[in-house]
Amino acid sequence: MTAKIILYEPPMCCSSGCCGPNPDQKLLDLQNTLAELEKLGVEVERYIISQSPKKFKENQEVMDLIQKQQLKVLPITTLNGKIIKKENYPTLEEFKKFINE
């Protein structure tokens, strides 16, 4: 089975959040991490709540968390449909650990 990661992310100015004169370092690191995962054959999708609200509504567990904890729970990361982390992005090491479990 191919691993599929979906990131449900807070509102950002663009699809990566890495634009502008002072991009957030954690988002730059995330870009590198996702590139590494894709090299390993992992499918990655990213959805920003302000740009893809329907994708959020398609995952009831994600919507329940947002309703209970508001947008502060974002980002939410799923692996093959299961939530593996919320409120922060996983590191490359964390992703590899979750994928290999």
Image: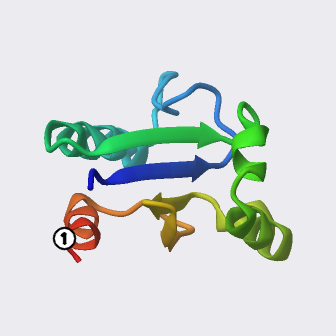
State which quarter of the image contains the N terminus: bottom left
**Count of number-bearing discs:** 1
Q: Quadrant of residue 90?
A: bottom left
- Eyeballing the image, is 16 above or below 73? above
Q: Is residue 13 left or right of residue 84?
A: right
Give the image's coloring scheme. Answer: rainbow
Residue at the farthest right position: 67
- Eyeballing the image, is 67 above or below 24? below
Residue at the farthest left position: 40
Q: Position of residue 8 (x, y in %)?
A: 59, 51
Q: Position of residue 77 (x, y in %)?
A: 49, 60
Q: Is residue 25 left or right of residue 96?
A: right
- Eyeballing the image, is 12 above or below 69? above
Q: Which residue occupies 69% across, 42% down?
A: 55
**Disc 1 target residue:** 100
**Towards the viewer: 24 or 54:** 54
Q: Which residue occupies 59% across, 25% down?
A: 14
Q: Which residue occupies 51% across, 40% down?
A: 46
Q: Which residue occupies 15% across, 37% down?
A: 39
State which quarter of the image contains the C terminus: bottom left
Q: Is label 1 in a helix, a strand or a loop?
A: helix
Q: Is residue 97 left or right of residue 43?
A: left
**Towards the viewer: 93 or 78:** 78
Residue type at mark 1 is Asn
Q: Position of residue 31 (x, y in %)?
A: 33, 38
Crowd band around label 1 with a 10 angstrom C-alpha radius: few (<14), some (14–19), many (20+): few
